[in-house]
Image (spheres, grey):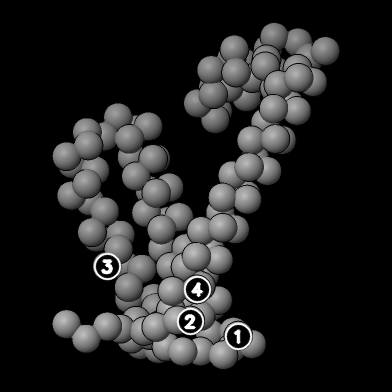
Amino acid sequence: MPTITAPAAKATATRTPYSISVLAYSPTYASRIASTRYRLWVIQQEAHDNLTETPRQETRAADDDPLPDLIAGQIGWVHQTVMAGTGRRMLDGGRPAEVSREMPGLLDGAEELLSEKVLNYAVRDA
């Protein structure tokens, strides 16, 4: 069993309260964390599959065409980046109104990194 100073030092460095650090040593808690991570992974996979299917249908892509899957990966990357950025800013004490005004800048940065092929894939007519 670790001493009090080791988890407390780690908790300070990662902003994790000491009580949460202690819980991480519990086998029951560790099992629940693993179960929750698995469920989150399943949800992420389902979301990716759904993101793949929509552009596949819109473009009438063949089932063996990898492009809809790759596009879904790019959409997922942008979503995950915005959610992580929002979460970090909120944990750092940001107010919702100011954080929401910062996120379009993050989206603009992500858009600059995406190719025209990605940006113009499965675009619907207005």
Kindly check if marks 1 and 2 are in contact, taking CB atoms under 8 A apart as contact: yes
Q: CA distance from mark 3 to mark 2?
A: 25 Å
Q: In the visual, does 63 lie left or right of 124?
A: right
Kindly check if marks 3 and 1 are in contact, taking CB atoms under 8 A apart as contact: no
The residue carrying pointer 4 sits among few (fewer than 14), some (14 to 19) or many (20 or more) residues within 10 Å by Cα, namely some
Kindly check if marks 3 and 2 are in contact, taking CB atoms under 8 A apart as contact: no
Does residue 23 appear in the picture of this structure?
yes
User: Where does label 4 land, which residue?
Assistant: 53
Kindly check if marks 4 and 2 are in contact, taking CB atoms under 8 A apart as contact: yes
The residue carrying pointer 3 sits among few (fewer than 14), some (14 to 19) or many (20 or more) residues within 10 Å by Cα, namely few
Q: In which quadrant is the C terminus drawn?
A: bottom left
Please name the amino acid that badge 1 sits on: Asp
Which numbered disc flags the more N-terminal residue, 3 or 1?
Answer: 1
The residue carrying pointer 1 sits among few (fewer than 14), some (14 to 19) or many (20 or more) residues within 10 Å by Cα, namely few
Residue drawn at the location 48% of the way across and 77% of the way down: 71
Q: CA distance from mark 1 to mark 2?
A: 8 Å
Residue 59 in percent (x, y) is at 42, 88
User: Where does label 2 land, which residue?
Assistant: 56
Which numbered disc flags the more N-terminal residue, 1 or 2?
Answer: 2
Label placed on residue 81? none
Q: CA distance from mark 3 to mark 4?
A: 25 Å
User: Where does label 1 land, which residue?
Assistant: 63
Which numbered disc flags the more N-terminal residue, 4 or 1?
Answer: 4
Please name the amino acid that badge 3 sits on: Asp
Q: In the visual, does 94 lie left or right of 52?
A: left
Residue drawn at the location 46% of the way across and 89% of the way down: 60
Residue farthest toward the right in the current orientation of the protein: 1
